[in-house]
Amino acid sequence: MQFMALIYNAEGADASYEGGMEQIMADYWKFGEEAREAGVMVAGDALEAVSTATSVRIRNGQTELTDGPFAETKEALGGYYLLECKDLDQALEWAAKIPTAKYGTIEVRPVMVFDN
């Protein structure tokens, strides 16, 4: 089963991480290596700041572009991991190892599989 681990945090919250940005990057590197070695990491990437986002909507046949994210929230989507796990419990165990879990939120959702 595949699970998407969505990484949310308030911009700038990583400054409160013990050891600072250098430590959080080292911890992310370690997590990635561990997840790859265990065979659970399918993909993962960080996203640029919310200020770089553009939202696209079609309303009444017209394309609407809005600078910024879809919704104003305290925490913003900062990245993701696509994990291959045997079940939700294993996915949650891996999500708890993602460094941002210490100061942000990791949302874990199963990837929907469509039968052809």
Image (tube, rainbow, N blue to C red):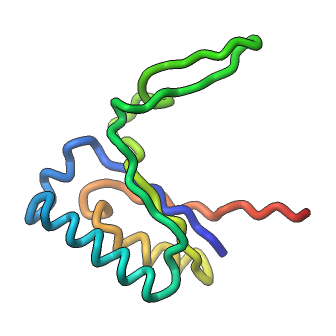
Q: Estimate the x, y position of residue 107 in percent, counting from the top left.
A: 47, 57
The residue drawn where x is 53% and y is 79% is: 89
Q: Is residue 27 above or below residue 64?
A: below
Q: Estimate the x, y position of residue 49 in percent, counting from the top left.
A: 32, 39
Q: Estimate the x, y position of residue 83 in percent, counting from the top left.
A: 54, 72
Q: Is residue 59 above or below residue 7?
A: above
The residue drawn where x is 43% and y is 21% is: 67
The number of numbered badges drawn on the structure is 0
Q: Estimate the x, y position of residue 99 in percent, counting from the top left.
A: 28, 66
Q: Quadrant of the N terminus?
A: bottom right
Q: Quadrant of the C terminus?
A: bottom right
The residue drawn where x is 13% and y is 51% is: 15
Name the foreground residue: 44 vs 10. Answer: 44
* 75 with respect to 23 (left or right): right
* 111 with respect to 5 (left or right): right
Q: In the rendered image, which quarter is residue 28 located in?
A: bottom left
The residue drawn where x is 37% and y is 72% is: 96
